[in-house]
Amino acid sequence: MANVNVGEKAPDFTLKNQDNEDVTLSALRGKPVVLVFYPLDFSGICTTELCAIRDDDSAFAEAGAVVLGISRDSRHTHKAFIEANGIKHDLLADMKGEVARLYGSWNEEMAFSERLTVVIAPDGTIVYTVHNPAGNARDHHEALDALRGMAHA
Protein backbone atom coordinates (compact mmCIF):
# COMPACT_ATOMS: atom_id res chain seq x y z
CA MET A 1 0.00 0.00 0.00
CA ALA A 2 1.27 3.45 -0.90
CA ASN A 3 2.44 5.84 1.82
CA VAL A 4 1.06 8.76 -0.16
CA ASN A 5 -2.53 9.81 -0.63
CA VAL A 6 -4.51 12.18 -2.80
CA GLY A 7 -4.68 15.63 -1.17
CA GLU A 8 -1.29 15.33 0.58
CA LYS A 9 1.89 17.16 -0.36
CA ALA A 10 4.26 14.93 -2.30
CA PRO A 11 7.40 14.05 -0.32
CA ASP A 12 10.43 15.85 -1.71
CA PHE A 13 13.51 14.02 -2.94
CA THR A 14 16.62 14.40 -5.08
CA LEU A 15 17.87 11.59 -7.33
CA LYS A 16 20.36 11.35 -10.21
CA ASN A 17 19.04 11.01 -13.74
CA GLN A 18 20.58 9.06 -16.61
CA ASP A 19 22.99 11.96 -17.27
CA ASN A 20 24.19 12.09 -13.64
CA GLU A 21 22.26 15.32 -13.04
CA ASP A 22 20.39 15.95 -9.79
CA VAL A 23 16.61 16.07 -10.19
CA THR A 24 14.78 17.53 -7.19
CA LEU A 25 11.01 17.24 -7.05
CA SER A 26 10.46 20.60 -5.31
CA ALA A 27 12.46 22.35 -8.06
CA LEU A 28 9.69 21.35 -10.47
CA ARG A 29 6.97 23.27 -8.62
CA GLY A 30 4.81 25.22 -11.02
CA LYS A 31 4.47 22.23 -13.37
CA PRO A 32 2.48 19.04 -13.02
CA VAL A 33 4.72 16.03 -12.39
CA VAL A 34 4.06 12.35 -13.04
CA LEU A 35 6.18 9.91 -11.02
CA VAL A 36 6.29 6.43 -12.51
CA PHE A 37 7.86 3.93 -10.09
CA TYR A 38 8.65 0.59 -11.74
CA PRO A 39 10.72 -2.53 -10.97
CA LEU A 40 13.49 -2.80 -13.56
CA ASP A 41 14.72 -1.50 -16.92
CA PHE A 42 14.72 -4.06 -19.74
CA SER A 43 12.01 -6.22 -18.15
CA GLY A 44 8.90 -7.05 -20.15
CA ILE A 45 6.06 -5.15 -18.50
CA CYS A 46 8.30 -2.20 -17.56
CA THR A 47 9.49 -1.80 -21.15
CA THR A 48 5.91 -1.99 -22.43
CA GLU A 49 4.70 0.62 -19.91
CA LEU A 50 7.55 3.07 -20.48
CA CYS A 51 7.32 2.73 -24.27
CA ALA A 52 3.56 3.42 -24.07
CA ILE A 53 4.33 6.63 -22.18
CA ARG A 54 6.97 7.46 -24.83
CA ASP A 55 4.38 6.91 -27.55
CA ASP A 56 1.99 9.32 -25.79
CA ASP A 57 4.70 11.89 -25.11
CA SER A 58 2.73 14.62 -26.89
CA ALA A 59 -0.28 14.12 -24.58
CA PHE A 60 1.92 14.56 -21.50
CA ALA A 61 3.57 17.59 -23.13
CA GLU A 62 0.16 19.14 -23.92
CA ALA A 63 -0.66 18.86 -20.22
CA GLY A 64 2.65 20.58 -19.40
CA ALA A 65 3.70 17.56 -17.35
CA VAL A 66 7.18 16.45 -16.39
CA VAL A 67 7.35 12.63 -16.42
CA LEU A 68 9.96 10.96 -14.21
CA GLY A 69 10.54 7.22 -14.22
CA ILE A 70 12.05 5.85 -10.99
CA SER A 71 13.59 2.43 -10.43
CA ARG A 72 16.46 0.80 -8.57
CA ASP A 73 18.55 0.65 -11.73
CA SER A 74 21.76 2.67 -12.02
CA ARG A 75 22.02 5.79 -14.13
CA HIS A 76 24.17 3.77 -16.55
CA THR A 77 21.43 1.17 -17.02
CA HIS A 78 18.87 3.97 -17.40
CA LYS A 79 21.01 5.59 -20.11
CA ALA A 80 21.25 2.31 -22.03
CA PHE A 81 17.49 1.70 -21.62
CA ILE A 82 16.67 5.20 -22.91
CA GLU A 83 18.96 4.74 -25.91
CA ALA A 84 17.61 1.27 -26.70
CA ASN A 85 13.95 2.32 -26.50
CA GLY A 86 13.88 6.01 -27.45
CA ILE A 87 12.49 7.01 -24.06
CA LYS A 88 11.99 10.79 -23.95
CA HIS A 89 11.65 11.45 -20.22
CA ASP A 90 14.21 11.26 -17.43
CA LEU A 91 14.78 8.03 -15.55
CA LEU A 92 15.97 8.42 -11.97
CA ALA A 93 18.28 6.04 -10.12
CA ASP A 94 16.87 5.00 -6.72
CA MET A 95 19.42 2.23 -6.21
CA LYS A 96 18.80 1.78 -2.48
CA GLY A 97 15.04 2.21 -2.77
CA GLU A 98 14.98 5.21 -0.45
CA VAL A 99 12.46 7.20 -2.50
CA ALA A 100 10.39 4.10 -3.26
CA ARG A 101 10.21 3.46 0.50
CA LEU A 102 9.22 7.10 1.10
CA TYR A 103 6.36 6.69 -1.36
CA GLY A 104 5.41 3.20 -0.16
CA SER A 105 6.19 1.23 -3.30
CA TRP A 106 9.35 -0.64 -2.21
CA ASN A 107 9.04 -4.42 -2.15
CA GLU A 108 11.64 -5.53 0.40
CA GLU A 109 11.50 -9.21 -0.55
CA MET A 110 12.12 -8.53 -4.24
CA ALA A 111 14.45 -5.52 -3.61
CA PHE A 112 12.70 -3.32 -6.15
CA SER A 113 9.80 -0.92 -6.47
CA GLU A 114 6.33 -2.09 -7.27
CA ARG A 115 4.37 -0.14 -9.87
CA LEU A 116 3.23 3.19 -8.46
CA THR A 117 2.11 6.20 -10.46
CA VAL A 118 1.72 9.52 -8.66
CA VAL A 119 0.37 12.65 -10.38
CA ILE A 120 1.37 15.84 -8.60
CA ALA A 121 -0.26 19.23 -9.18
CA PRO A 122 1.89 22.32 -9.80
CA ASP A 123 1.55 23.27 -6.10
CA GLY A 124 3.01 19.92 -5.00
CA THR A 125 -0.29 18.30 -4.00
CA ILE A 126 -0.95 14.71 -5.02
CA VAL A 127 -4.04 14.46 -7.24
CA TYR A 128 -3.88 10.81 -8.35
CA THR A 129 -2.19 7.55 -7.37
CA VAL A 130 -2.36 3.95 -8.50
CA HIS A 131 -0.28 1.17 -6.94
CA ASN A 132 0.01 -2.22 -8.60
CA PRO A 133 2.11 -5.27 -7.72
CA ALA A 134 5.13 -5.81 -9.97
CA GLY A 135 3.34 -8.23 -12.31
CA ASN A 136 0.31 -6.01 -12.98
CA ALA A 137 0.70 -3.34 -15.65
CA ARG A 138 -0.82 0.11 -15.29
CA ASP A 139 -2.79 2.12 -17.82
CA HIS A 140 -1.01 5.47 -18.21
CA HIS A 141 -4.21 6.94 -19.68
CA GLU A 142 -5.54 7.22 -16.11
CA ALA A 143 -2.62 9.53 -15.26
CA LEU A 144 -3.36 11.55 -18.41
CA ASP A 145 -7.01 11.82 -17.32
CA ALA A 146 -5.85 13.14 -13.93
CA LEU A 147 -3.65 15.72 -15.67
CA ARG A 148 -6.52 16.81 -17.91
CA GLY A 149 -8.81 17.01 -14.86
CA MET A 150 -6.40 19.49 -13.26
CA ALA A 151 -6.48 21.65 -16.37
CA HIS A 152 -10.28 21.87 -16.19
CA ALA A 153 -10.53 22.40 -12.43
Image: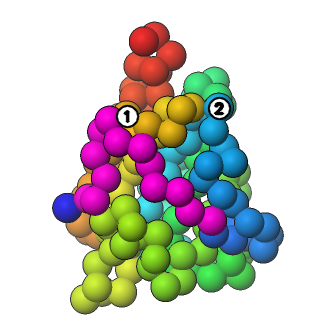
| Circle 2 SS class | loop
Q: Answer whether residue 110 is visible to the viewer in this image.
A: yes
Q: Residue furthest left?
A: 1
Is the residue 73 above or below the residue 100 in the image? below
Residue 6 falls inside the magenta stretch? yes
Point out residue 97 in the picture as x, y percentages from the top left corner.
Answer: 45, 79
* Magenta region includes residue 32: no
Amino acid type of the residue that numbered disc 2 sits on in the rendered structure: Gly
Judged left or right of residue 28, residue 44 is left
Q: Residue at x 44, y 48 (%)?
A: 10
Displayed quadrant of residue 104: bottom left
How many marks can you see? Answer: 2
Whole-percent x, y for residue 14 in the image: 63, 65
In this orientation, which residue lies closer to the viewer: 152 or 59? 152
Q: Which mark is residue 36?
A: none
Question: Which residue lies under the disc numbered 2?
Answer: 30
Q: What amino acid type should be assigned to the residue bearing mark 1?
A: Val
* Residue in the picture at 37% in, 72% down: 101
> On residue 127, which mark appears?
1
Q: Is residue 55 above or below residue 147?
A: below
Horizontal side of 11 relative to 109 (left or right) equals right
Residue stretch in magenta:
2-14
Q: Where does residue 120 sit, x and y in percent of width and height?
A: 47, 39
Q: Is residue 126 above or below residue 117?
A: above
Q: Label 1: state its secondary structure.
A: strand
Q: Position of residue 69 (x, y in %)?
A: 55, 59
Residue at (40, 26) in percent of width and height: 145
